[in-house]
Amino acid sequence: QVQLVESGGGLVQAGGSLRLSCKYSGRTFSHYAMGWFRQAPGKEREFVATISWSGGSTLYDDSVKGRFTVSRDNAKNTVTLQMNSLEPEDTAVYYCARGGSAQALISHYEYDYWGQGTQVTVSS
């Protein structure tokens, strides 16, 4: 059984940083791409970042490129999202998810397991 648990969310001022972590429980974490998505109130869930099985390939939404960094540790079954230069527009619930394949994936339809989410609030 696969379980994803996010942590690290919170309240931060604009310009600050947060580091989100996602702990994966289950077999073969290293076989799958992992992704981060977010959903703000009244908006649809949107792609943030993804990382391939090896960590060798990453993709980012244009809105976070240069500010966010996704990484993974296959020995610890964790994926991390380092968020710098946060903006009020980054306020949302952030979800990690397991991709349906090893390659970096953008569409949320291609992810099969999701965490419960962690709230990130950026004040202006």
Image (cartoon, helix red, strand yellow):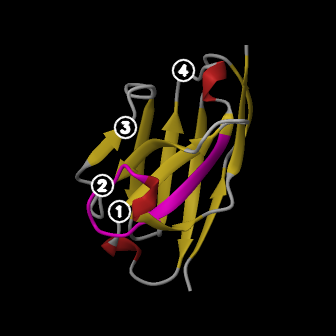
- Identify the amino acid type marked 3: Tyr
Q: Earlier in the sequence, mark 3 or mark 2?
A: 3
Looking at the picture, does residue 107 appear above or below residue 112? above
- The amino acid marked with disc number 1 is Ala
Give the extent of the magenta segment: 93-107
From the image, state whether disc 4 or disc 1 is nearer to you.
Answer: 1
Of the image marks 1 and 2, the number of the one nearer the N terminus: 1
Which SS class for mark 3?
Answer: strand
Can the viewer see residue 118?
A: yes
- Residue 66 position, x and y percent, is 38, 25
Q: CA distance from mark 2 to mark 4?
A: 24 Å
The residue to which callout 4 is attached is 85
The residue located at (38%, 27%) in the rendering is 62
* Place of residue 57 in the rendered image (x, y in percent of width and height, measured from the top left): 24, 50
Q: Is residue 114 above or below residue 46?
A: below
* Mark sitting earlier along the chain (2/4): 4
Q: According to the image, label 2 marks what residue?
A: 104
Q: Is 32 left, or right, of 77 in this rendering? A: left
What is the secondary structure assignment of the residue under circle 1? loop
**Which amino acid type is marked by label 2?**
Ala
What secondary structure is found at the residue carrying circle 4? loop
Q: Which residue is mark 1?
A: 33
Residue 60, label in figure: 3
